[in-house]
Amino acid sequence: MKFIFILCCALCLSAYGQESKRALTLSEYDLIKGISFKNIDKKTSIREKGFLFSRPSTNGVFSVALNDGSERKIFLYKISEGTTPKGLGLLAVFSTPTKQIQQCIPNTLAPKEVWAKYVEDLKNNNKTTDGFAVCMAYVLSQLGPDLATESIKEEEDSNDFCFPAELFVNLADGTEKSIASIQVGDIVSGIKEGKVTQVKKHQGTFSLTRLLIKPNSQAWVSRKVQNGLIALEVTPNHPILTLLGKTSVNRLKQKDWVFVHDVVSERYVTAEIVDIQQNARTVPEVYSLSTEHGIYDVEGIVVLDKH
């Protein structure tokens, strides 16, 4: 009897979880995108056009300072229907001292045409506003559980997340070191510079995936670019920063966007994956880093810590 009661409770909770979200339609997406928001720094709850936008008291505001000295802030709001608690996704309000952009982020139930429009808007907004795409991607990769459930969330993987010994990591002072020679306390570059807190070495037999990446504009990276392409070798489950946030290598597809650290301009420019070579080679040892802010550059490509 006790088992039946527990089973019924589990089924009810599951049904509630499924009912708490619904798919965002394309017309709703366009409507939300066109709403003008004022005084967003002071408002945690907004009702507009039949929707409720609610910003968590914690984990709802992100600040990113890029090298040009201009602070970017992103305010994240959960979107729900005005009359029901059903979640539709997130609204990101990207704000600089001179500009404000609304970016609707659909939840995972949204149809393909909505997701296609979302990706198109990310790319178009990046063309008109420097730093938009990389700031949005970084914030999406850092979402806590209360917000991540409304958008893309990578499943945890207990396997190793590593790079071969000879790959180079960019340091905050403009130099670079092979990942095998990185030490705890080294300060790495990234969307946020930070100290290395742990270096792990793994020995065995490791199969690497090779990514061939083409910057969408001229980029000068620390390693030699061959035929306009940057190569990155990594174990298949390592997370890197993509246009949609945190994505493991084994989930990448050709034409996905990633980010390249341009060492001349110190900007993070977009780049496109043009080829994915699985089982490119095997190596006897690999290395992984834990960093202060969970992000660093390997071979000029922005990657993320394991967790």
Image (cartoon, helix red, strand yellow):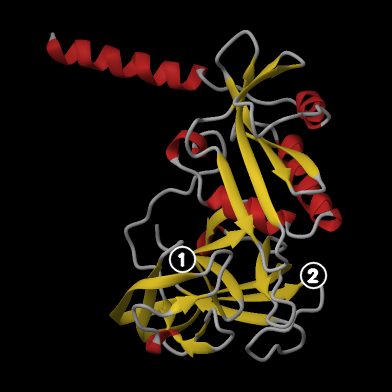
Along the line of sight, which residue is nearer the eye, 207 or 226?
226
Q: Residue 224 appears in which quarter of the rendering?
A: bottom right
Q: Quadrant of residue 35?
A: top right
Q: State how far apart marks 2 and 1 are (Cα).
A: 23 Å
Query: Which secondary structure lies at badge 1?
Result: loop
Residue at coordinates 72% horizontally, 81% vertically from top-left?
229
Quarter in which the C terminus is drawn: bottom left
Choose between 73 and 295: the one closer to the eye.
Answer: 73
Which residue corresponds to mark 2?
216
Identified by mark 2, the residue type is Asn
Q: Residue at x 41, y 73 (%)?
A: 162
What crowding class fits label 2: few (fewer than 14 Cα within 10 Å), some (14-19), or many (20 or more)? some
Q: Is residue 272 above or below residue 117?
A: below
Relative height, residue 255 to residue 21 (above, below)? below
Residue 140 at what x, y percent from top left?
A: 57, 48
Question: Of the residues shown, which amino acid type is indicated by label 1?
Answer: His
In the depicted structure, whether residue 200 falls above or below residue 258 = below
Q: Position of residue 180 (x, y in %)?
A: 39, 87
Q: Name the quadrant containing residue 265.
A: bottom right
Please name the residue that numbered disc 1 is placed on: 238
The residue lying furthest to the right in this view is 128
Residue located 37% across and 81% down the image? 286
Q: Say which of 177 and 224 sits in front.
A: 177
Apparent side of residue 109 relative to residue 125 in the rendered image (left or right): left
Residue at 73 percent across and 13 percent down: it is 50
Q: Earlier in the sequence, mark 2 or mark 1?
A: 2
Among all residues in the image, which is located at the extreme left?
Answer: 1
Would you say residue 21 is visible in this rendering?
yes
Which corner quadrant holds the N terminus?
A: top left
Mark seen at residue 66 = none
